[in-house]
């Protein structure tokens, strides 16, 4: 959980099509800056790395469902971007003219394409390989910022248009909720078809000869059908990288890919450590679900959690870190001077050191009627994906801390009315003053103090909330069509219980507190004391929200992730040469990296 400030993104004016560009009449305006035009200087810099290629009408540059092999810039002519190309459901998304480029977020991560790019008017394109593109994105800040923001914007537009694969399942099904959460958190374009209310669902089941008991289904391009797939199976369909199959003993295994985990990956990989990052659900952690972070150092105009995450992922990849999603760690055990971490699918990774950066998740609310609506109209994050469903009806937010205040302000940019329900008697108990001022002044926000939800009303969607006013004992009903819950967070440490020292709330103890809980002789045998971010297991570290006593802020998590790598170097160096410093390249910090 993070207390960093979140607010609606400022939306620039839509860009008018020009010089061969065509805006589709039903298309969402370019409020994300998704379709920038390259300058002559940028085109020239790209031309230094790519090759020119003549194209004719009907040439397919990118095929939906296949990995993108090249990055294309239109030099002359035009290229159409379509969904369901060659089928009765073919759908035109955009036409690009000279100066535009083809691609979206999957292009940078090696995912399969969610669209087909076909030459409409003959001309010439500039083609760059994926390695050439990644090199430019990470080395040329001007082109890198332009391409990254455009790719993020295009992915957001694809999600909003319901492009990509379809999930067919009941809103009451836990597996349907699981697949929807995985797709949403990983920003994968998809459309949910509710088995309970959508007439299209029955037609699709008949078409594929599938019974309702076999749902949820994932259907893509009418050629691929997955029956109740695991998150890993869905990830492989889209092209997310799997766990490494080789059992090489790497230097550092990072469990968790929030700000702490990604910062550690960037620092470790850039300093020559063989680094692997594993993530159970989606990169970015809680910060990745934040619409806008305004107090992150170095971004005076703010940055979205998604963009911060994607920048971190690209930066870690540039230095050679491997990031795998989903990979749920279930155990850790010492083995031959290393640590073996086992995963839910039965696989295992062995490393010389381990960094725990699993963060925390918002605590679920337990009141009658809520479970059946979780994932449909009861949410534990407030991102643009949930907010888009709240444009016409009032919503409610539960919580009295910064996260709740930030969510209220963000949702007020979408919904006509936002209720903030706080169990305490005042906002200033847990909320920052600057947030209180904004919440209390906002015309769309109604604050209800000393108020607690007692029941959630609604069978298929949220209809209302029953609540009690503790100051009077009066029961009353609140009209709301969506509920957002921010009532504290629990750490992802159940799998660590009994293995290393945790505090009373389940957060990982480090440093002197961890040493005090260690077994007799643990640190004497190491010939040293427990390091600041080290756990009760020598060589296992913790950083970010999962660590006991950490400051729940993005900047703090990033700092701890970077600092943890410094302690990893000290630990590995000491283990290799007791009483001295290891001189191997894998454990010696690169001077230029540390100075940077």
Image: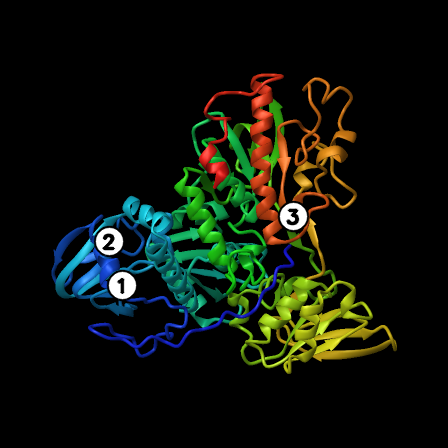
Q: CA distance from mark 1 to mark 2?
A: 10 Å
**Neighbourhood count class around disc 3 (C-alpha, 10 Å): few under 14, some 14–19, many 20 upward:** many
Query: Which quarter shows the N terminus?
Result: bottom right
Return the disc, 1 or 3, that comes first in the chain's sequence.
Answer: 1
Q: Nearer the viewer, residue 390 or 266?
A: 266
Name which quarter of the figure residue 479 lies in. Answer: bottom right
> What label sits on residue 545 in the rendered view?
3
Residue 209 on image: x %, y %: 40, 58
Q: Find out whether the residues at labels 1 and 2 contact each other: C-beta distance under 8 Å.
A: yes
Q: Is residue 405 visible?
A: yes
> What label sits on residue 135 in the rendered view?
none
Residue 319 on image: x %, y %: 41, 39
Does dot 1 land on a helix, a strand or a loop? loop
> What label sits on residue 46 in the rendered view?
2
Q: Is residue 348 visible?
A: no
Q: Nearer the viewer, residue 460 or 139?
A: 139
Residue 127 on image: x %, y %: 21, 52
Residue at the spot x=32%, y=45% of the render? 135
Q: CA distance from mark 1 to mark 3?
A: 40 Å
Q: CA distance from mark 3 to mark 2?
A: 41 Å
Does dot 3 land on a helix, a strand or a loop? helix
Does dot 2 land on a helix, a strand or a loop? helix
């Amino acid at each position: 959980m993070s207390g960093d400030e979140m607010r609606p993104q400022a939306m620039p004016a839509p860009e008018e099509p020009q010089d061969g560009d065509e805006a589709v009449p039903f298309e969402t305006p370019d409020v994300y800056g998704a379709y920038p035009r390259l300058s002559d200087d940028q085109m020239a810099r790209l031309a230094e790395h790519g090759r020119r290629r003549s194209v004719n009408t009907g040439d397919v540059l990118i095929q939906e469902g296949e990995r993108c092999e090249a990055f294309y810039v239109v030099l002359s002519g035009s290229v159409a971007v379509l969904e369901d190309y060659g089928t009765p459901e073919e759908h035109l998304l955009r036409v690009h003219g000279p100066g535009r480029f083809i691609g979206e977020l999957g292009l940078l991560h090696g995912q399969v394409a969610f669209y087909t790019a076909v030459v409409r008017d003959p001309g010439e394109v500039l083609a760059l390989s994926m390695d050439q593109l990644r090199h430019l994105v990470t080395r040329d800040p001007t082109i890198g910022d332009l391409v990254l923001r455009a790719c993020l914007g295009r992915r957001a537009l694809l999600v909003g248009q319901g492009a990509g694969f379809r999930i067919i399942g009941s809103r009451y099904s836990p597996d349907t909720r699981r697949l929807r959460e995985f797709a949403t958190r990983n920003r994968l374009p998809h459309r949910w078809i509710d088995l309970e209310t959508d007439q299209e669902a029955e037609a699709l089941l008949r078409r594929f000869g599938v019974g309702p008991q076999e749902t949820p289904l994932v259907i893509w391009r009418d050629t691929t059908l997955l029956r109740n797939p695991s998150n890993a199976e869905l990830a492989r369909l889209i092209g997310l990288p799997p766990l490494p199959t080789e059992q090489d003993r790497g230097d550092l295994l990072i469990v968790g890919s929030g700000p702490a985990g990604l910062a550690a990956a960037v620092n470790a990989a850039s300093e020559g450590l063989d680094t692997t990052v594993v993530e159970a659900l989606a990169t970015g952690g809680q910060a990745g679900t934040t619409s806008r972070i305004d107090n992150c150092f170095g971004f005076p105009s703010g940055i979205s959690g998604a963009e911060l995450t994607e920048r971190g992922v690209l930066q870690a990849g540039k230095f050679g870190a491997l990031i795998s999603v989903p990979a749920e760690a279930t155990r850790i055990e010492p083995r031959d001077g290393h640590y073996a971490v086992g995963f839910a699918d039965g696989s295992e990774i062995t490393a010389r050191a381990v960094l725990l950066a699993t963060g925390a998740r918002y605590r679920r609310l337990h009141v009658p009627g809520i479970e059946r609506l979780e994932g449909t109209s009861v949410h534990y994050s407030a991102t643009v994906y949930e907010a888009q469903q709240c444009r016409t009806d009032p919503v409610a937010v539960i919580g009295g801390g910064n996260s709740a205040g930030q969510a209220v302000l963000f949702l007020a940019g979408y919904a006509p009315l936002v209720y903030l329900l706080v169990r305490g008697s005042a906002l200033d108990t847990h909320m920052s003053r600057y947030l209180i001022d904004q919440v209390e002044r906002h015309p769309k926000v109604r604050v209800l103090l000393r108020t607690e939800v007692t029941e959630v009303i609604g069978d298929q969607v949220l209809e209302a909330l029953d609540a009690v006013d503790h100051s009077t004992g009066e029961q009353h009903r609140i009209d709301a069509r969506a509920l957002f819950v921010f009532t504290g967070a629990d750490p992802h440490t159940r799998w660590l219980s009994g293995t290393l020292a945790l505090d009373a709330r389940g957060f990982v103890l480090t440093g002197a507190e961890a040493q005090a809980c260690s077994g007799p002789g643990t640190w004497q045998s190491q010939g040293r004391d427990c390091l600041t971010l080290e756990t009760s297991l020598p060589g296992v570290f913790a950083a970010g929200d999962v660590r006991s006593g950490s400051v729940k802020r993005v900047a703090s998590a990033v700092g701890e992730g970077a600092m943890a790598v410094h302690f990893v170097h000290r630990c590995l160096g000491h283990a290799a040469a007791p009483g001295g410093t290891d001189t191997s390249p894998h454990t010696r910090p690169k001077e230029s990296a540390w100075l940077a």
